Image (spheres, helix red, strand yellow):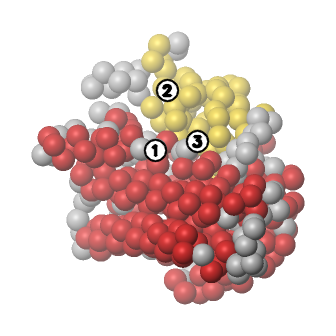
C-alpha cells in the first residue's frame, strides 16, 4: 500500500467502474454491497488510504481521497458512500493511541463503520469503559469489521461534566463480533449502504480504543492536523458531486435518443434541454471547483505548519454544503427536463435523484450551515455553528 499514491489509486478506482456498474441493481436489491465489490475495494486499498504508514496505510492527501470518493460515487452512489465512510474512518489510525490503532487497523482488510453522535453510555471502569447504546445510520454495517460509537461518559450512573458544563463525550471502538446490527435501512436512496441501526450491551472498551476530536493526534503530520469533522463534510459532499456527473452523462445520452412527445425532434434539439444542461453542468463544476479550492488552500497551509482555525473549519463546511446542494439542484433540473422518462426505475436519473437527495440529508450538508456562516459574517468572526463547537471538543 505504501507505493499507492495519487494517480495510481485514481486509475485503480476507475478500473473498477465496469464491475460496479454491472452490479448496480444487485446493490439496491440486497440493500448492501455485494461481496465481490467489497473484496475489490479492499484489494484496491481504498479503506486504508488515510491511515498512517506505521500501520500499513497510504496517508494519502485529502484532495486525492475526495477524488476517490467522487469517482466511486460516479460508478454508484451507494458504493461511493461506503468508500467515504470506511476510507475516511481510516484517519482514526493516526489519531488513536498506537496500541488501539494497531489492534483495529493493523489488519490490512479492516473496514470501520459507525456514527459520531454520542448516543451511547460509557461507564468509566478500571482500564476503560463499559459501553451500552444504540446508534442510527451505521453505514457499511454489512461488511464492517469494527464499529465506532459516540458516548457520554459516566461515573456510575452520573454523567461526567466538562469545565464548560457539557457532558464529557468520547468515541468508542468495538469489534463487529460484539455488535448487534438491527435491520432498519428501508430507504429510497443509497439503498446499498446497509445504514442500519446497531447496538452493544455492556461491552468493555479499553482506554486505548477511545478518542475525542480535541485529543492531540498520535501522528503529528499534516493530515492528522486537519479538522476531522470538517474534512468529513468535504468527503460527504464528494458523493453528490460524483452522482451529479453521472446524471449529466445520463441526461446527454437520453437527450440524443428521446423523441419529444407530439414532435419529430429529439430532446437534444430543444433549447430548453440546452439551457438545462448548461446550467446543471455549471452548478456541478462550480461547486466542485470551490470545494476542491477551499480544501486545497487549507491543506497547503497546514503542510506549512499552520493550525486550522474555527473560521477555517466553517469554510470547509460551507464549501461542502454549497457543492452538495448545487449538485442536487443540477440533478433535479435534469430529472425534470427528461420528462416522464425519468420516473422509471430503469432510468439512471431516477436513482441519481434518490441517491443524491439521501446524501444531502446528512446533517453535515444541510442548509442550516449557510445560516451559521451568515451569522459569523455579520458578527465579524462570531461563534461558529453548534456542531463545529461540539466536535472541537468537550472543553
Q: Which residue occupies the foreground of this view, 373 or 122?
A: 373
Task: For residue 313, say whether it is visible.
Answer: no
Foreground residue among 369 and 332: 332
Q: Give the Cα separation between the discs numbered 2 and 1.
A: 25 Å
Q: Which mark is residue 115?
A: 3
Disc 3 + disc 1, Cβ < 8 Å: no
Q: Residue at the location (37% across, 44% down)?
A: 369
- Neighbour tally class for label 1: few under 14, some 14-19, many 20 plus, Cα within 10 Å: some
**388 or 361, which lies in front?**
361
What residue is shown at x 34% (from left), y 35% (from top)? 386
State the image coordinates of residue 269 (x, y, percent, origin top left): 62, 80
Q: Which residue is mark 1?
A: 366
Q: Residue beneath label 2, please?
A: 152
Which is closer to the viewer, label 3 or label 2?
3
* Mark 1 secondary-structure assignment: loop
Specify the quadrant of the image occupied by residue 253: bottom right
Q: Tell me the quadrant of the picture where the C terminus can be found.
A: top left
The nearer-to-camera label among 3 and 1 is: 1
Which disc is residue 142 wearing?
Answer: none
Amino acid at each position: 500500500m505504501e507505493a499507492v499514491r495519487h494517480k495510481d489509486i485514481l486509475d485503480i478506482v476507475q478500473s473498477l467502474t465496469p464491475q460496479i456498474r454491472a452490479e448496480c441493481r444487485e446493490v439496491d436489491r440486497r440493500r448492501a454491497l455485494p461481496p465481490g465489490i467489497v473484496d475489490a475495494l479492499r484489494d484496491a486499498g481504498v479503506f486504508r488510504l488515510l491511515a498512517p504508514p506505521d500501520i500499513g496505510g497510504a496517508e494519502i492527501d485529502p484532495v486525492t481521497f475526495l477524488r476517490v470518493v467522487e469517482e466511486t460515487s460516479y460508478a454508484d452512489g451507494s458504493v461511493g458512500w461506503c468508500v467515504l465512510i470506511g476510507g475516511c474512518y481510516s484517519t482514526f489510525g493516526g489519531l488513536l493511541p498506537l496500541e488501539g490503532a494497531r489492534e483495529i487497523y493493523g489488519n490490512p482488510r479492516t473496514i470501520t463503520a459507525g456514527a459520531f453522535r454520542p448516543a451511547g453510555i460509557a461507564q468509566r471502569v478500571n482500564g476503560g469503559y463499559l459501553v451500552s447504546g444504540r446508534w442510527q445510520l451505521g453505514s457499511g454495517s454489512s461488511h464492517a469489521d469494527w464499529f465506532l460509537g459516540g458516548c457520554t461518559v459516566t461515573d456510575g450512573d452520573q454523567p461526567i461534566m466538562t469545565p464548560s458544563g457539557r457532558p464529557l463525550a468520547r468515541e468508542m471502538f468495538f469489534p463487529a463480533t460484539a455488535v448487534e446490527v438491527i435491520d432498519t435501512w428501508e430507504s429510497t436512496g443509497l439503498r446499498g449502504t446497509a445504514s442500519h441501526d446497531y447496538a452493544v450491551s455492556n461491552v468493555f472498551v479499553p482506554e486505548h480504543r477511545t478518542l475525542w476530536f480535541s485529543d492531540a493526534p498520535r501522528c503529528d503530520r499534516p493530515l492528522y492536523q486537519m479538522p476531522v469533522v470538517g474534512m468529513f463534510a468535504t468527503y460527504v459532499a464528494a458523493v453528490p458531486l460524483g452522482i451529479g456527473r453521472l446524471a449529466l452523462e445520463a441526461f446527454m445520452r437520453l437527450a440524443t435518443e428521446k423523441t419529444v412527445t407530439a414532435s419529430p425532434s429529439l430532446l437534444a434539439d430543444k433549447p430548453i434541454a440546452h439551457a438545462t444542461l448548461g446550467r446543471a453542468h455549471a452548478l456541478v463544476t462550480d461547486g466542485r471547483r470551490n470545494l476542491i479550492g477551499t480544501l486545497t488552500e487549507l491543506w497547503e497551509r497546514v503542510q506549512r505548519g499552520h493550525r486550522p482555525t474555527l473560521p477555517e473549519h466553517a469554510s470547509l463546511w460551507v464549501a461542502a454544503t454549497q457543492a452538495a446542494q448545487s449538485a442536487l439542484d443540477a440533478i433535479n433540473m435534469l430529472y425534470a427536463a427528461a420528462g416522464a422518462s425519468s420516473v422509471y426505475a430503469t432510468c439512471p436519473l431516477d436513482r441519481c435523484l434518490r441517491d443524491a437527495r439521501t446524501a444531502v440529508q446528512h446533517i453535515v450538508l444541510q442548509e442550516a450551515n449557510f445560516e451559521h456562516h451568515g451569522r459569523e459574517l455579520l458578527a465579524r468572526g462570531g461563534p461558529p455553528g453548534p456542531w463545529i463547537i461540539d466536535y472541537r471538543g468537550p472543553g
